[in-house]
Amino acid sequence: MAKRIVILGGGTGGTLTANRLRRSFFEEDAEVIVVDQNDDHVYQPGLLFVPFGLARADELVRPRHDQLHKGIRFHQVPIDRVDIKEDQVFLADGTVLGYDVLIVASGSRLEADETEGLTGPGWRENVFTFYDLAGAAALHDALEAFDGGKVVVNVVDLPIKCPVAPLEFCFLADWYFGQRGIRDKVDLSYVTPLDGAFTKPVASRRLAGLLEEKGVSLITEFNTGEVDGAGGRLISYDEREILFDLAVIVPLHSGATYVSNSPGLGDELGFVAVDEHTLQAVAKENIFAIGDAAGVPTSKAGSVTHFEGEVLVENVRRFLAGEPLDATYDGHANCFIETGFGKALLIDFNYDTEPLPGHFPTSVGLPLLKESRLNHLGKLMFQSLYWHSLLPGRDLPGMGSAMPRRGKVTSGVR
Amino acid sequence: MPTAIYAGVNVTVNDEGFFEIPDEWTEAMAPEIARAEGIDGLTEPHWQVIKFMRAEYAEKGTGPTVRILGKTSGVSIKELYQLFPKGPAKEAAKIAGIPKPRGCI
Ligand SMILES: Cc1cc2nc3c(=O)[nH]c(=O)nc-3n(C[C@H](O)[C@H](O)[C@H](O)COP(=O)(O)OP(=O)(O)OC[C@H]3O[C@@H](n4cnc5c(N)ncnc54)[C@H](O)[C@@H]3O)c2cc1C
């Protein structure tokens, strides 16, 4: 009888996993089912460009079901909970789905309400986020109407999706206000709970240098406890205050609510603990997690999700065949960092190797940790690769799952 | 590797003063470490957090973040900052004798 593989979430990870699985199993051997609460697949990396008028919100959305290949069943309904003992998923419409293998691909959720005041007075008036479609579109209108003052970009706490995106926002804001001829009237600052611009030392120093070059103040170790929109203040838990006219906030992230409502499945924040090399859940051997939903020590990014996909699908096959799992996912992440003025920087890293300078994937490739026009084109090209290669579950040209070492300068870097 | 002396015993710490070997820690050392951090006198709520940090470390291999502490320790984030003004996750980890929390990427 056909085995049943149920995939919870039809975003980046759910879609590419379903399409890869469909190719690696005959329909009579495995049934592939994807569940998602809606049919709007958003190209999230594009959200960064919407506030600056460099992309339109409606251009970033395509129907989810169109991204799923023939032979995949799609249920459009919210997931309520999972009973990991009985191998069953409960959907909001009363359907109960049994499974042989469960793949959690339900991403992360913005928890704006967890920060005092954030969604209170001022929300979407002088306090915004660009981390969802409606927020990015609202911020676009606010930026167009903005004619000077203090702009703060604040990450409340990690983990967040694409931890470089708020830095990119600062770089683009510097460019944008310059284009409008009001850069000298805008005071830009980047406010982070970290002790530097980024988590990894070499990249952190380069990115701090870029902020300085672009006249963006860097305020570190600021743990936002409250956002006072009416008073235009960020207030930290240790009672420091930062004043603003316009605040761009990246809210706290959690896993999907149903994960927390499913005993044994998630951690305190609703992410699923997995073996970081096989992606098999600690909770039970027939459960795997991919993408933002997985509690692994690397960035929450589409590129990470893509690299995980290859190992995950192989492991589902091995698990069903009773073979030992492939423990080769290395934490590989690859992120273009848009720096404005038609340039971008590229970082490439994994669990063990921090982002280093050099070239990607070999010594004649794209420059790493250095601004270039080529990287900007790479970032633009990613959108078409996303719909046409990444979601269909194809390998990207010149890029395997494992992080390439050739081309990186590994010694004497400061 | 630097060392420090607490309660008359030599222990291994990293360059920021976090314990490298949690087993070298004893409860008698906590008040001294706290004093060096500017906290005079550990109260019952301090101990509640310190014990929670050690239990979390023993279970998960890393100390919790402030947000997780606020969700699970039974002490709110505001109170945590009153107890450990320099930042609960790091300061409490130091006093509880566990390595610096890894945090997120
Ligand atoms: C502003 C921004 C910029 C970014 N830039 C980049 C970038 O430049 N490069 C990069 O690689 N990555 C980037 N990312 C990150 C990237 O988009 C995500 O890491 C990636 O989409 C994660 O895929 P996923 O499948 O884990 O989650 P998602 O694609 O978010 O999918 C999760 C799915 O689960 C569904 N779901 C959740 N709960 C339920 C429920 N209860 N019932 C039913 N369905 C549910 C949701 O509807 C959603 O469709 C960016 C993200 C943002 C927000």
Image (tube, coloured by chain):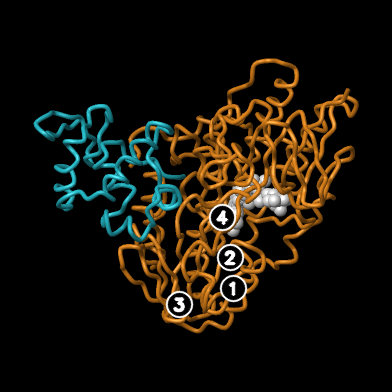
> Disc 3 is attached to a residue of which chain?
A
Q: Amino acid at mark 4?
A: Arg
Percent x, y for residue A234?
40, 71
Camera-near label (4 vs 1) is: 1
Q: Residues within 10 Å of mark 3 (few under 14, many from 20)?
A: some
Q: Name the secondary structure under disc 1.
A: helix
Q: Quadrant of the N terminus of chain A?
A: top right
Q: Nearer the viewer, residue A41 or A97?
A: A97
> Disc 1 is attached to a residue of which chain?
A
In the rendered image, which quarter is residue A394 located in?
Answer: top right
In the image, taking residue A270 as reference, residue A311 lies left or right, namely: right
Q: Nearer the viewer, residue A129 or A353?
A: A129
Residue matched to label 3: A183
The Cα–Cα distance between marks 3 and 1, rounded to whole angstroms, is 18 Å
Name the residue: 67% across, 34% down. A84
In the image, taking residue A317 as reference, residue A243 lies left or right, namely: left
The Cα–Cα distance between marks 2 and 3, rounded to whole angstroms, is 21 Å
Q: Amino acid at mark 2?
A: Phe
Sequence-wise first label, 3 or 4: 3
